[in-house]
Protein backbone atom coordinates (compact mmCIF):
# COMPACT_ATOMS: atom_id res chain seq x y z
CA UNK A 1 0.00 0.00 0.00
CA UNK A 2 1.36 3.40 -0.98
CA UNK A 3 0.73 6.26 1.39
CA UNK A 4 0.75 9.91 0.38
CA UNK A 5 3.35 12.10 2.04
CA UNK A 6 3.03 15.77 2.94
CA UNK A 7 3.48 17.89 -0.17
CA UNK A 8 5.61 21.02 0.04
CA UNK A 9 4.91 23.85 -2.41
CA UNK A 10 8.42 25.19 -3.05
CA UNK A 11 7.18 28.57 -4.24
CA UNK A 12 5.50 29.22 -0.89
CA UNK A 13 8.23 27.85 1.38
CA UNK A 14 10.28 30.60 3.06
CA UNK A 15 12.70 28.15 4.72
CA UNK A 16 11.69 29.40 8.17
CA UNK A 17 12.28 25.93 9.64
CA UNK A 18 9.09 25.75 11.73
CA UNK A 19 8.03 22.48 10.16
CA UNK A 20 11.47 20.96 10.69
CA UNK A 21 11.54 21.98 14.35
CA UNK A 22 8.03 20.55 14.82
CA UNK A 23 8.68 17.22 13.10
CA UNK A 24 9.27 14.77 15.97
CA UNK A 25 10.34 11.99 13.58
CA UNK A 26 12.93 14.15 11.79
CA UNK A 27 11.39 13.32 8.40
CA UNK A 28 11.81 16.90 7.15
CA UNK A 29 14.95 18.86 6.30
CA UNK A 30 15.97 22.03 4.50
CA UNK A 31 17.42 21.22 1.10
CA UNK A 32 18.77 24.37 -0.41
CA UNK A 33 16.23 26.98 0.64
CA UNK A 34 13.19 24.69 0.65
CA UNK A 35 11.81 22.24 3.20
CA UNK A 36 11.52 18.68 1.92
CA UNK A 37 10.46 15.26 3.15
CA UNK A 38 14.02 13.97 3.28
CA UNK A 39 13.28 10.74 5.17
CA UNK A 40 9.83 9.59 3.99
CA UNK A 41 10.13 6.31 5.86
CA UNK A 42 10.13 8.28 9.13
CA UNK A 43 6.92 10.25 8.46
CA UNK A 44 4.13 9.09 10.76
CA UNK A 45 1.44 11.29 9.14
CA UNK A 46 0.82 13.41 12.25
CA UNK A 47 0.06 16.55 10.11
CA UNK A 48 1.84 18.85 12.59
CA UNK A 49 4.02 20.24 9.79
CA UNK A 50 0.95 21.39 7.89
CA UNK A 51 -0.49 23.04 10.99
CA UNK A 52 2.63 25.09 11.83
CA UNK A 53 3.39 26.32 8.31
CA UNK A 54 2.43 30.00 8.35
CA UNK A 55 2.83 30.25 4.56
CA UNK A 56 0.51 27.34 3.77
CA UNK A 57 3.36 25.65 1.90
CA UNK A 58 2.64 22.19 3.29
CA UNK A 59 -0.40 20.22 2.24
CA UNK A 60 -1.14 16.80 3.66
CA UNK A 61 -3.13 15.00 0.92
CA UNK A 62 -4.58 12.52 3.35
CA UNK A 63 -7.05 12.46 6.19
CA UNK A 64 -6.19 11.06 9.59
CA UNK A 65 -9.14 9.20 11.08
CA UNK A 66 -9.12 8.23 14.74
CA UNK A 67 -11.59 5.50 15.51
CA UNK A 68 -12.83 5.03 19.03
Image: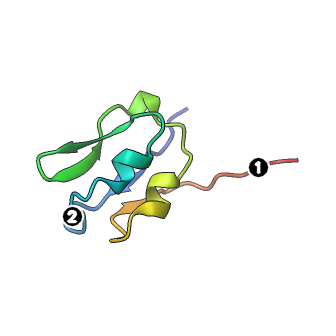
Counting residues from the start of the chain, the first of labels 1 and 2 encountered is 2
Q: Residues within 10 Å of mark 1 (few under 14, many from 20)?
A: few
Q: Is residue 45 above or below residue 33?
A: above
- At mark 1, the secondary structure is loop
Judge from the rendering whether residue 9 lies leftward or rightward of residue 50; answer left or right.
left
Q: Where's residue 15, x and y in %?
A: 21, 57
Q: Is residue 42 above or below residue 3?
A: above
Residue at image location 54% in from the left, 37% down from the top: 44
Q: Residue furthest top?
A: 41
Residue at image location 47% in from the left, 36% down from the top: 43
Q: In the image shown, does 5 or 32 lie closer to the viewer? A: 32
According to the picture, the residue beneath numbered tag 2 turns out to be 14
Judge from the rendering whether residue 36 lies leftward or rightward of residue 26; answer left or right.
left
Q: Residue furthest left?
A: 32
- At mark 2, the secondary structure is loop
Which image quarter: residue 29? top left
Q: Where's residue 24, x and y in %?
A: 48, 38
According to the picture, the residue beneath numbered tag 1 turns out to be 66
Distance from Cα at disc 1 to Cα at disc 2: 32 Å
Q: Is residue 21 above or below residue 1?
A: below
Q: In the image shown, does 34 or 22 lie closer to the viewer? A: 22
Residue at image location 27% in from the left, 46% down from the top: 36
| Closer to the eye: label 1 or 2 | 2
Which image quarter: residue 9? bottom left
Q: Where's residue 48, x and y in %?
A: 51, 53
Give the number of callouts. Answer: 2
Q: Where's residue 4, x and y in %?
A: 47, 45
Amino acid sequence: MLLALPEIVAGRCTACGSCIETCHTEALALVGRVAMVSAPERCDYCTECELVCAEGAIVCPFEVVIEQ
